[in-house]
Amino acid sequence: MLEKIRNKFSGFKALFISDPINIRYLTGFIGTHGLSLITKRKAYFFTDSRYIEYAKKIVPKEFQIIQLDKKWKKDWPGLLKKLRIDSIGFEEDFLTVSKLAGLKKISKGVNFKKAGGIIENIRQIKSKQELILTKKSQEINEKILEDIKHFIRKGITEKDLEWFILTKTREYGCEGPAFNPIIAFGNNSSIPHHQNSDRKLKKGDVVLIDMGTKYHGYCSDMTRTFFTKNPSPLQTEVYEIVLSAQKAAIKELRDQASIFRVNKAARNIIDDAGYKDNFQHGLGHGTGLNIHELPNLGAEKDAKLQQNMITTIEPGIYIENNFGIRIEDMVIISRNGSINITNAKKELADAIIKI
């Protein structure tokens, strides 16, 4: 892994890592204060006295562990001088302006350069173990969804259902949710990222549930839309369009598939049905230690997907102040196609739950 990172150095001699997710990816460390410096030949991990014993147990032997203390501001310049470091790459999407200024202050003569997401790009391609953990996370996610079908009833609020999901994630051995679940009843479902409220469920409401768990650090993500009575002709039409768009996009997934082409497969179906203006968010995103990471399936992207990437496919149609439909699966890119690791049923007949 370290050699992959070093091979990406461009215009600097060392990489300073401060994003906790990237720290966890490289070292397994999940404390609140961990930093790393990777050079062409060495790797260092820094933490304070609260975590030093833990770090010695968890951080790989490739990293030399250094305790941060009151001498940090004096020891850091000496380390850079010893290593002959005159340029450092930094994570511009994470390191704040003030912290970068402080780092520069104690790094006299060192040029700092934006690193451009080196580790985030490497993280796109999942290892065998990462795929196993993600699959397990999604299995638990679907187990909770089945529990929801037995829990849901007239009179519960969106926040009641949210709390039920959060409780179940812990009950089934997860660290917690991958994100705060989105629960939208009735016309609240027309808001793609609705904020859960005290609205009570009544018969006839559409129920949109976007949920995920975090298992050993790895996130799952799934959306299902349900009807609490037989859907209207318009609801039926929209649901079938969204489902067809999702299936068309998934069919295009494979190693070296064009993200633009995958998008086009889904959006053509929605556009041709007259709902172009009702689908305004991205088609999907990668998952991993973060719920949103690369690859990004934005419509304008012309990049290629690669084997062992994970992406969601989540088209949606939202009719303002009426209802919204979104269907989301997680898919692993394989050499000749893809592996859909979301097994929750999604045909129209499966989306009707009587209350």
Image (cartoon, rainbow, N blue to C red):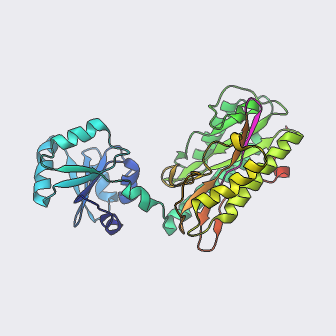
Place of residue 246 in the rendered image (x, y in percent of width and height, measured from the top left): 71, 55
Question: Is 132 positioned to the left or the right of 51 in the image?
Answer: right
Compared to residue 122, the image places residue 198 above or below, namely above
Looking at the image, which residue is at 64% across and 33% down? Answer: 194
Q: Which residues are magenta?
A: 320-329
Question: Is 110 positioned to the left or the right of 45 in the image?
Answer: left
Judging depth in this view, the residue of 204 and 257 nearest the camera is 257
Looking at the image, which residue is at 69% across and 55% down? Answer: 266
Q: Is residue 267 visible?
A: yes
Compared to residue 186, the image places residue 138 above or below, namely below
Name the quadrant of the N terminus: bottom left
Place of residue 248 in the rendered image (x, y in percent of width and height, measured from the top left): 72, 60
Q: What residue occupies the far bottom of the structure in this picture?
A: 336
Looking at the image, which residue is at 85% across and 45% down? Answer: 236
Q: Is residue 352 visible?
A: no
Instruction: Identify the image quadrant of residue 170.
Output: top right
Compared to residue 312, the image places residue 280 above or below, namely above
Judging depth in this view, the residue of 126 and 105 nearest the camera is 105
Place of residue 66 in the rendered image (x, y in percent of width and height, measured from the top left): 21, 53
Question: Is 136 positioned to the left or the right of 207 in the image?
Answer: left
Judging depth in this view, the residue of 318 and 23 nearest the camera is 318
Name the quadrant of the C terminus: top right
Residue 321 shown in magenta: yes
Place of residue 53 in the rendered image (x, y in percent of width and height, measured from the top left): 28, 52
Residue 200 shown in magenta: no
